[in-house]
Image (spheres, rainbow, N blue to C red):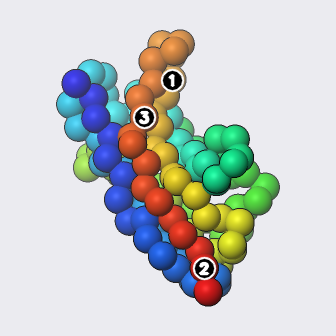
Amino acid sequence: QVKLVESGGGLVQPGGSLRLSCAASGMDFSFSDYIMKWYRQAPGKELELVADIILTPDTADYADAVKGRFTITRDNSAKTSALQMNRLKLEDAGVYYCNEEHTTIRGLDYWGKGTLVTVSS
């Protein structure tokens, strides 16, 4: 079965950086058939799409709140996605989830269990 596992979360001071990783296994279709996405959920807030990438870096898209600070990448051969987070702010704290959504099969998507990012001085 398809499994997504996030890693890289932790405690960081405001202005610091973290790199989150998402590793996929047990793929049903080709990894490149999926759009890779990162969501986050802060305590008491709704789930928010942070960034997504279809295939190449020029297909990446970002929430306004993270543009210029976060970078999403993917490595199709390794079946991984990463979210490089720089100049972190207090409001970036939350649980970050990796998601993959099939490009053509509606409703086919998978989620990781999340990794916690804490931003605190």
Mark 1 to mark 3 CA distance (whole Å):
15 Å
Q: Amino acid at mark 3?
A: Trp
Mark 2 secondary-structure assignment = loop
In this picture, residue 93 sits left or right of residue 66: left
Mark 1 secondary-structure assignment = loop
Question: Is disc 3 surrounded by few (<14), some (14 to 19) or many (20+) residues within 10 Å?
Answer: some
Q: Residue at x 69, y 74 (%)?
A: 89
Q: Where does residue 68 sit, x and y in percent of width and height?
A: 71, 68
Q: Where does residue 97 sit, x and y in percent of width and height?
A: 48, 46
In this picture, residue 51 sits left or right of residue 33: right
Badge number at residue 103: 1
Mark 3 secondary-structure assignment = strand
Q: Where does residue 41 sit, x and y in percent of width and height?
A: 61, 48
Q: Amino acid at mark 2?
A: Ser
Q: Residue at x 76, y 59 (%)?
A: 65
Of residues 45 and 73, which is closer to you in this image? 45
Mark 2 to mark 1 CA distance (whole Å):
37 Å
Badge number at residue 65: none
- Looking at the rendered image, the quarter that the N terminus falls into is top left
Q: Decide if residue 26 is in sight here.
A: yes
Q: Which residue is mark 2?
A: 120
Q: Residue at x 71, y 66 (%)?
A: 91
Q: Decide if residue 82 is in sight here.
A: no
